[in-house]
Amino acid sequence: MGCSSWNSFRAYYNTFYNAKKSFHSGLSKVDEQAVIIDPTQPVLVHQTPPEAGSNDFEEAIEKGAQVLQNYRHSKWVDDALFLIGKSYYYLHKYYSALQKFEELQNSLSPEMQQQAIIWKGKTLLALGDFIDGVTYLEGELGNSPTNLIGQRAEIQVLVGEHHAMLGNWDEAAQWLSRAIPNIKNEKRLGRTLFLYGQILERSQRYGEAYYAFSRVKEYFPGFEYAYWATFKQADVARKQGNKDLATSIYKSLRRDDKNIGRRDELIFQIARTREMKGEAEQAVQVYKSLLSSEEGIRRSLQAAVYYRLGKVNSDIFKNYPLAAAYFDSSSALNNVENTTGDLDAEVLAKTYGRFASLQKTIQRSDSLLWLSSLSPSKLDSVIEQITIRKRRQLLEQREAESESRLLNQNLQEQVNGNRTVSSIYGFLNYRNEELVNRSKAAFRIIWGNRPPIDNWRRIEAVRQTAVSSGPMPEDRVNLAASSEEAAAILDLNIDEIPTTLEERAGLQSEKAVAQYELGNLLFLKLNSPDSARLYFHRVINSSAEKELRSKAMYSLYELFNAQNKSDSLMFWKHQILEKFPGSKYARRIALNGDGGVIQQVDRTPSSVLKEKYHQIVVSGKPRKASRLHTLALENRSSELAPAIYYRAIEEYIRQAKKLAKMNYFIAAISSDSLQDKQVVYFIQPEREKLYFANAYWDSVQIVISEFDSYFANTVESEKVAKLQKILEKSIPSPMPTCKSLGVKLEVKAGMDNFLSKVKYPGKLEKVSLAGSFSYSFIVTADGEIASYELLSNRTSLGIEDALEAAFDQLSFEPVAIENPPDKLRCEVNFPIQK
């Protein structure tokens, strides 16, 4: 054996063998660490290593250094240098690692040079030095041997990773695409495909991203990668608009026992998908079921649920006070990811809270001003309604409290086996004088001094029917014209009704200020300029002080300036200069170019028509729709006429919606609901057709149908056609029912089998239940559920929530008749016995 061979032999067994053994011991401890993925960020193929095995890596460095010191001429020098550099990398000593990899690039071995480039690229990635990483790696790729395909592919992956961290999605996608066909290591290929899918998603190449994610599991990159790859398939399918596919994927993940700890997140995503499909009410039910989960959900998911509830209530239900409360809860729990792109939960909570406060101020002022305009007899009638309503609210509140107390009492008895209070004081506590007196007082608050005789309720119902058989007083119709206005009136203190001209003027001023602030809030904070315009117009058309009206005009000027609508901008410019020439707003406009002098307006036919149009829009006078309609037809040769005609259609629709609220209330008071001296404020689904039973809807249909005969092939034609389709879909036709067809819905696999899957709240575990809950389902001919509605009174026990959570697993047998309708409405009773 020659001297050189003997030195190499001694170097390997005396030092390098032990160094390698220590390194692999440390590496095994690194590999044992759990892989955690945050799919909201690019998941790097070469992730920063966890801190583990530090003693082993220190020992590997020490043994490797002995090779360099004592056996510098052996063939293990490059290997020792490489081992030391990798050990520094796993110890997070990145600058020391860089030094070793740069030394290694001087190796005579092309393969070792390529490994040095790869590990230097990984180290620059860990250091966050992405620009230098791109420059270095792209330069080295130009000089690397073409025959080392696997190493070149890994360098290309690293270039893609550096670009991804810089947000250069197109460049990152290109480099990864080149690398993927040549990656030999299966696990690395699976992880590369995951990152590739994320980058394609950010480039909005959703179809390609879906395919990339679908391939990840083929290469066994680990359970965490496999789960999130499937999850991301659903995510990109949803972004593509394929929400049914997304729901199917989320549900398949939820059914997998390996994902039991992630089921809450998956349920949230299913609810979010339903929300995106327009099924807001069903989504809200699922969101609330998550919040009421017995096991509880993690803090960040709670925050996300509250955030979505806030968005649904603000964007869809327009319930701004409730939205504000949900956003506030979300903000308090966590700084959740900002899904709106511009406002976070804390800002939204404050904004919508302020919005609700201003709306309440306006409603309160409106209600007090209206009440002050009533005759004494009409005012007495309204006060009577307020009293009835408040009594009913108190009754409902006390019934809920009583039900809760009874449930808690039963639970306590069953747990502790204690004697009940009733067993001590007798049935209904009739021996306890204090409880009896308290119950009598509460009864009088709710029912008043009703006669202590049999059938008193029927006698009272007959009396009420006699009273209500005549024409409905105008004030009662107005009181419930909208549920918001009714609520505002019911919450009033009667003593606040103004009795003098000064008090009325003060309320009108308070209302105008609130309207102006609400307009500003919509324009500046909520990005709703169209809604803001409405409130600014109301201020301008009010009797507010000049200062406030000029501010509202200037706000409209700024609004149209931001929208680049030059015609409207010029209109409000001239309005301010003409009506408020000495105001600071006129001076501010003057500084923009014309010195405050109103120049001669171009009196072309178009300018005259624009002026007439603006005068109608801002006048606040009645019959705005018909006036716009007439203006368009009188000037049908003008290029502006189609737009004016379309605005007339919108105005007819607005008036029709306003009048529809009145029809709702008339339908309610004509029902038998008044027998219990209760005014109904919400309309049942079977009265939906009354929404469209007014003359304005007839006018809408007429003007839409006439549009093409006057203005065919104009820009507005497509918008009018869409309106016509929406209107056709909106006017409901009677839906056939199971009862009318003589059929009954049968639960697939049987009712008992379905009820066995219902998971009741933990608080009911030891409580005996008996009864039934009735639901109305709209189903297809195949028995698939389209929607459902609870017909029974909702309790506070959570039984309905449990049933509805199980409806995801509920399906019915096909309707057993010839030529069944596409959809029908059927009532189903669910017996509860436990």
Image: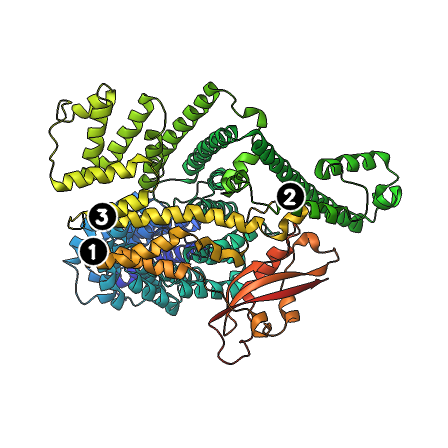
- Image quarter of residue 140: bottom left
Q: Which mark is first along the chain, 2 or 1?
A: 2
Q: CA distance from mark 1 to mark 2?
A: 53 Å
Secondary structure beneath dot 2 equals helix
Residue bearing mark 2: 467
Residue 617 lies, with reference to residue 657, above or below; the image says above
User: Residue 632, which numbered label?
Assistant: 3
Q: Earlier in the sequence, mark 2 or mark 3?
A: 2
The amino acid at mark 3 is Ala
Horizontal and vertical percent position of residue 713: 19, 59
> In terms of sequence position, does the residue under pointer 3 or pointer 1 come before the other?
3
For disc 1, the neighbor class at 10 Å (few under 14, some 14 to 19, many from 20) is some
Q: Which residue is mark 1?
A: 711
Q: The residue under label 1 is which amino acid type?
A: Phe
Residue 143 rendering spot, x and y as whole percentages: 14, 58
Determine the residue positioned at 40% across, 45% down: 337
State how far apart marks 3 and 1 are (Cα): 10 Å
Query: In x, y percent, where is residue 366?
Result: 47, 32
